[in-house]
Amino acid sequence: MLRRVLLGLAASASLGAPVLAQSVDSLIARSVEARGGLAKLRAIQSVRMKGELSMRDVDAAIVIEIKRPASVRSELKLGGTLLIQAYDGKDAWGVAPGDMGAQRLSAEMAKDVAARADLEGPLVDYAAKGFRVELVGERELDLGEAQVLRVTKPSGEIEDHFLDAESFLPVRIEVRRTLQGKELVAETTLDDYEEAGGVMWPHTIESGIKGQAERQTLTIETIEIDPALDDARFRMPATAGPGKRD
């Protein structure tokens, strides 16, 4: 029945546009409510997540810190080497193995890092962020049926956000990227939701390129709500070591 309704809306765009917009906003509202509600989301001022990132045959400890209004820092520890990526709302930088200090990230990497600072995600207040959102319809996933909302950013980048048809929690994100003239789809699957601070957070995040077998899995072990985070942690240092720690 829902499929027929959606097809009918697509066939009569001029008459159906207001209904479609209402459906988009209704789905986003239900998803936000499933996560805990907008008030609880906005009440959170900072988050610290600790866990493990598994890729190929390597497991690494990871810490992710987010602070409003737009700061984020991730630290990945590989043996005695500490890899850092951070954004302070203005500059994105990192420390990688072999570097002599903190380095500014490329424009493409900086965009990805900055996006991680959005605690609500791109669907909340999408118009104010300059995004366009449309309802694509239903899609059958290995996780079950999902409603698909397509986010188009001012840059032209397109993201498909999949909301579980029953819980309305986000379960997958697909981002289209062009690399050396070839379009790739970066696929992220969100699972194992648990509550922290009155908000539901995914504790298993698997990512990779669609159609390719290789995947990396982020397993969140602890989430700390509103830890005290100094702004200096997110700012690019004037000097930095080579990313080594004992």
Image (spheres, grey):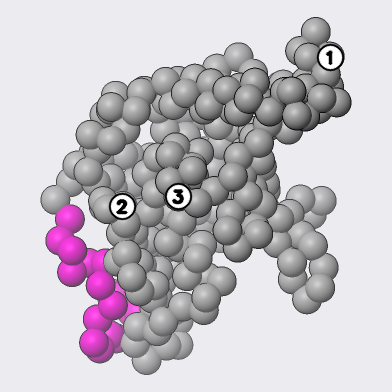
Neighbour tally class for label 3: few under 14, some 14-19, many 20 plus, Cα within 10 Å = few
Query: Which of label 3 and label 2 is nearer to you?
Result: 3
Q: Which mark is residue 230?
A: none
Taking depth in this image into account, of 214 and 165 the one nearest to the observer is 165
Q: What span is colored magenta in the figure?
A: 229-246
Q: Which mark is residue 129?
A: 3
Give percent across and percent down for residue 132.
59, 45
Q: Can you identify the residue that label 1 sits on? A: 4
Under mark 1, the amino acid is Arg
Question: Within the magenta stretch, is there residue 241?
Answer: yes
Residue 221 seen in the figure:
yes
Residue drawn 44% across the image and 26% down it: 32
Q: Pick whichever of labels 3 and 2 is earlier in the sequence.
A: 2
Could you give the CA–CA distance between mark 2 and mark 1, rounded to whole angstroms? 42 Å
Which quarter of the figure has residue 73?
A: bottom left
Q: Helix or strand or loop: what does disc 2 sit on?
A: strand
Q: Which mark is residue 66?
A: 2
Which quarter of the figure has residue 35?
A: top left
Q: Is residue 71 left or right of residue 129?
A: left
Q: Helix or strand or loop: what does disc 3 sit on?
A: loop
| Residue 170 in the image: above or below residue 48 | above
